[in-house]
Image: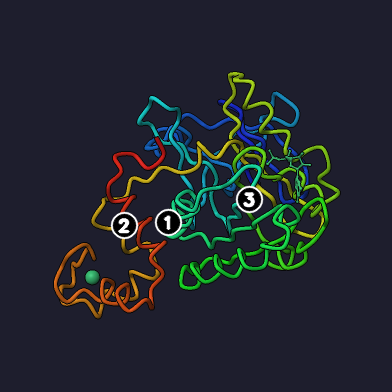
Amino acid sequence: MKGLVIKSTGSWYQVLAEDGEMWQARIRGKLRLQISDTSNPVAVGDSVEFEPDPNFAQTAQIKAVEDRKNWIIRRANKSSARRQILACNLDAAVLVASLVAPRTSMGFIDRFLLICQAYKVPAIVFFNKTDLLGEAGTEFSQDINQVYRESEATMLWGSATQEHGLDPLLEQMRGKRVLFAGHSGVGKSTLLNRLFPEAQARVGAISDHHEKGKHTTTFAELFPLSDGTQIIDTPGIRDFGVVDIPKNELAQYMPELRSRLPRCRFNDCQHINEPGCAVLQDLENETLPSERYHSYLSMLNEEDMFA
Ligand code: GDP
Ligand code: ZN
């Protein structure tokens, strides 16, 4: 039988079978050995093959995992170097951000976008709480859209509580498997509940568990909706992603730098102080926004981008 992993709790996985039935599944011992480079060999979003356990109802054994098209990895815990797949086989990732109450920093948004580029997940940033920006809102959004014009990310603006600007986001999500992330307080739960009333009271709850510091291995949970859309809710963003990308490859994952490399004199240009660098040139003549470049420099200088 085939199914989709929608939740992982320690050694048990919740698997939604193709016929809509829910199974509690464990990994067969042999499989565990085959895929053990991360601490969770099976992750939310995995398509798996499973076999019902003859001895227990609705209980199954996972026999095989299909190849993943992409994934997002987190650190197993703060002090550990072990990796854990947060979710996989994603069609898009949405970062819910806010310019006020609380402010999501541009540096943080840029790290999120870099991870999405590195793991090949199309990125959307939804700037929530536009109702709090007042008169200046239009100007803010125009400026920020300008800064991100070459980022390949979709920038959307709106307000969950005012139900403003939600349709463009829905359009980007319909029928897809979409991961949602955001700092606590930006309005992620409010937004998800307004977007998908049928998910009411289920999404968002995951963060609460997490914040109470309970011992839990549920870091992401997939909610299948009746229109075919699948939401993967994740808790605190501090856990989002690990960048184990060598510093000299970072520029590859910033589209505005990647696209300029062919015009740089050196084909391994890091765009720092090299002669004949097209990036430095475009910064000089202001055809490349300096904000994104500064994020690049700060990522280059950081020991651990998510410390
Ligand atoms: P989460 O931690 O990201 O899930 O955030 P919540 O959904 O719990 O929202 C945090 C607070 O922000 C709540 O008081 C919400 O009512 C409020 N909020 C959410 N969206 C908006 C919005 O668009 N505008 C305003 N003004 N407040 C919002
Ligand atoms: Zn260069």
In the foreground, 181 or 225 = 181
Which mark is drawn over residue 180? none
In the foreground, 172 or 33 = 172
Type of the residue with mark 2: Leu
In the foreground, 96 or 82 = 96
Closer to the camera: disc 3 or disc 1? 3
**Taking 265 as reference, is 12 left or right?**
right
* Rendering coords of residue 69 (x, y %): 49, 58
Q: CA distance from mark 3 to mark 2?
A: 26 Å
**Taking 287 as reference, is 231 left or right?**
right
Q: Which quadrant of the figure has residue 251?
A: bottom left
* Rendering coords of residue 136 (x, y %): 66, 62
The residue labelled by disc 2 is: 250
Count of residue discs: 3
The residue labelled by disc 3 is: 98
- Element class at badge 1: helix
The residue labelled by disc 1 is: 114
Q: CA distance from mark 3 to mark 1?
A: 19 Å
N-terminal label among 3 and 2: 3
Q: Residues within 10 Å of mark 1 (few under 14, many from 20)?
A: many
Q: Ligand 1 within 8 A of label 3's CB?
A: yes
Closer to the camera: disc 3 or disc 2? 3
Please give the name of the residue rendered at 62% of the width and 27% of the height, measured from the top-left corner: 210
